Image: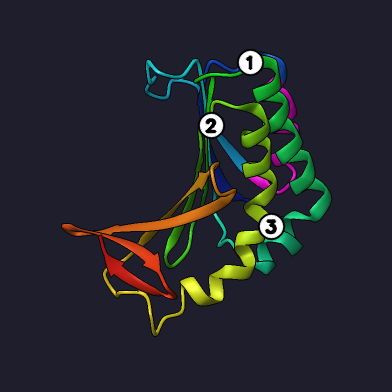
Amino acid sequence: MSISKLPLSLRFYGTSPWEMEVLFSLLHNLFNVQEDPSADQDEDFTTMMDITFPLEFNEVFFKQFGALRWDKLKGIIKEMKRRRGGGKSLRVYIRFSGKPDIIFMIDLDDRHSFDTAIDKIDFVLELLPYQLDPKKIPKEITKVSYQFDDIIGRWNISADAEDRTYGFVENEWKVT
């Protein structure tokens, strides 16, 4: 009896065949990778990669995906930035399906800041019980976004719902 793999979406443009082969080989053992090389191109960035995991961002994800595989994925993304240099050369989205969906967006110009952002994604896991506490998070929020602030060196969270934008300030969600 074979177990079907969950679908993982991989959208991209401006990547090399080598980069895509390495990513695909890393991901296809666990997921049914659905590639979309015709993603809409943003004229500000030469390369974009958008990975949507069909799993929630939590400890279970890291157990299923594996620490070694996660470190390899981060290494591939950092190598993509190194190969392209500074400036607006690479934008990366790492998405997780859940309640709410979680999106990490990295598009920093400076390579060191970019690498730091990639490395610090893991630390957000420890904040989730506070930031996504069902008693605190507004019910209409279905998606939260994290953007890395390279000045203070941490991930900032925000969420859009209907006609409102929320920020997580002083341990609570507030309309911004």
The residue type indicated by label 1 comes to: Arg
The label on residue 100 is none
Check the picture and name the quadrant holding the C terminus. bottom left
Q: Does the magenta stretch include residue 21?
A: yes
Q: Residues within 10 Å of mark 3 (few under 14, many from 20)?
A: few
**Looking at numbered disc 3 in the image, what kind of residue is underneath it?**
Ile
User: How busy is the neighbourhood of tag 2: few (under 14 within 10 Å), some, or many (20 plus)?
Assistant: many
Q: Is mark 3 on a helix, strand or loop?
A: loop
Can you tell which quarter of the image residue 60 is in? bottom right
Question: Earlier along the polypeptide chain: callout 2 or callout 1?
Answer: 1
Q: In this view, does 171 lie above or below 25?
A: below
Residue at the image position 54 percent from the left and 15 percent from the top: 14
Q: Can residue 4 be seen in this view?
A: no
Check disc 1 and report the residue beneath it.
84
Which residues are the magenta region? Answer: 19-31
Q: Majority secondary structure of the magenta segment? A: helix
Residue at the spot of label 2: 108
Residue nearest the viewer, comparing 113 with 58: 113
Check the picture and name the quadrant holding the N terminus: bottom right
Residue at the (29%, 69%) spot, across then down: 174
* x and y percentages locating residue 145 in the rendered image: 42, 53
Pointer 1 local density, CA inside 10 Å: few below 14, some 14–19, many at least 20:
some
Q: In this view, does 140 lie above or below 152?
A: below
- Can residue 173 be seen in the rendering of this structure? yes
Q: Is mark 1 on a helix, strand or loop?
A: helix
CA gap between label 1 and label 3 equals: 39 Å
Q: Which residue is drawn at 29% across and 75% down?
A: 139
In this view, the residue farthest toward the left is 163
Q: Name the residue under label 3.
A: 3
